Amino acid sequence: MSDVKWLNESEMAAWMAYVAATHLLERRVEDQLKVDADLTHAQYEILAKLSQDPGGRMRMTELANRLIVSKSGLTYQIGQLERRGLVTREACPSDERGVLAVLTEEGKRCLERTAPGHVAVVRAFLIDQLTPEEVESMRQIMTKAAAAMRAAPAGPLRPGKIPG
Amino acid sequence: MSDVKWLNESEMAAWMAYVAATHLLERRVEDQLKVDADLTHAQYEILAKLSQDPGGRMRMTELANRLIVSKSGLTYQIGQLERRGLVTREACPSDERGVLAVLTEEGKRCLERTAPGHVAVVRAFLIDQLTPEEVESMRQIMTKAAAAMRAAPAGPLRPGKIPG
DNA sequence: AGCGGTTAGTTCAAATTTGAACAAGCAGTA
DNA sequence: TACTGCTTGTTCAAATTTGAACTAACCGCT
């Protein structure tokens, strides 16, 4: 029971580098978006995710799930974006309770204007630091991890359940 | 000037998976630490980083830099940990202005008690999802990215400066 | 010793994020 | 139809995080 499977040297180094890199990158991304468009990364991700829908619209809960953010957090940020005219709320036709977050024309323009600088940061500090093989490897790695976490139920780990 | 180098399919997939995975993992880690030890990830990282020092002590600014957190953020969290007896503040002998954050015995015990569950989460959702080669690849990738960001000065990107 | 420019750490206000509680609406079933 | 349980989105209080402003102390020079 109490025998822990620690991380070996390679695993520990990978984890430590991961933690450092994610914090550093998040900081760089936040800075760029703040300076260039007065947006937080969370706000940018909302605009970007909405733009993936043909109609630029998405249900609140659906959007929250895709962004991996709490419902209340999304409510708050949609309020901020609405205040700035980048997003509107519409009633959902099929569900009286539902709310659709809709990308406005201005929101679309804002995104198009901001995306290049954002991509430049992602490129400069991450993508362009890697070989194409490494990019492909990262895709594989992150996809696997994300899939595992999406599949696993919330709550404490059940020994031997997830890795299988 | 305005010709943007967008992300190709592989790059975009890698970036999207990265964003999703980091959010999902952060959430899992936070949940485990909250449940098992009533600690935030930020607090755990402070304890862990302090424990890396032989004397379990570190200057505030040094610690903030290693954790990639603002000085004020660290001040706040050290206050929280001090309130719980996991860390103490000591005067720095060599610099009158300096403050040393010191891991207490109880802090050490808390870390030792909490680490196994934390490692288990990191393992279950990240490390054990990967082949040893992929772990090694992730180490390489994240190390490269972190190095690039640590090396680059703050502020806007100077075209052609970082990638070289 | 005294000056001027940095650095260390804290305080403060503002923004963000989360979970719990809540009101309203849905859907299946007796 | 009425009931039961679940889902949707918001509100709310509490915790966290950041940058700016500030005080105190350091350091190199004169």
Image (cartoon, coloured by chain):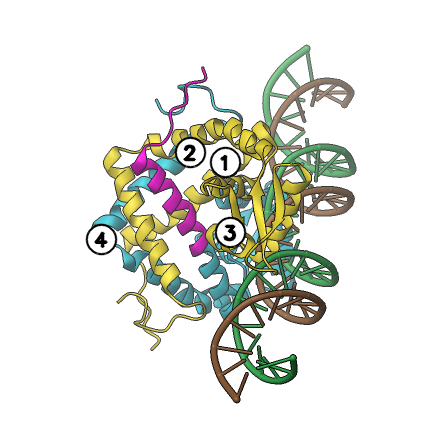
Chain colours: A cyan, B yellow, C green, D brown
Q: Amino acid at mark 3?
A: Leu
Judge from the rendering whether residue B26 lies leftward or rightward of residue B134; answer left or right. right
| Element at label 4 | helix
Residue type at mark 1? Val
Q: Nearer the viewer, residue A43 or A4?
A: A4
Residue identifier under label 4: A132
Q: In the displayed structure, would residue B135 be above or below residue B73?
A: above
Say whether residue A142 is left or right of residue A54: left
Disc on res. B122: 2
* Crowdedness near tag 4: few (<14), some (14–19) or many (≥20) residues, C-alpha within 10 Å: few
Sort mark 2 into few (<14), some (14-19) or many (20+) by Cα contacts within 10 Å. Answer: many
Q: Earlier in the sequence, mark 1 or mark 3?
A: 1
Magenta residue span: A1-24
- Asked whether disc 2 touches disc 3, contact meaning CB atoms under 8 Å apart, the reply is no
- B117 and D26: which one is in front? D26
Q: In front: mark 1 or mark 4?
A: 1
As displayed, is residue A102 above or below residue A138?
Answer: below
Residue A142 appears at what percent x and percent y? 35, 42
> In this rendering, do the residues under marks 1 and 2 share a single chain?
yes
Report x, y in % for residue C15: 64, 59
Can you see residue B17? no
Mark 1 lies on residue: B29
Instruction: Give the Cα distance between marks 3 and 4.
Output: 35 Å
Q: Are marks 1 and 2 in contact (CB under 8 Å)?
A: yes
Q: Which residue is mark 3?
A: B63
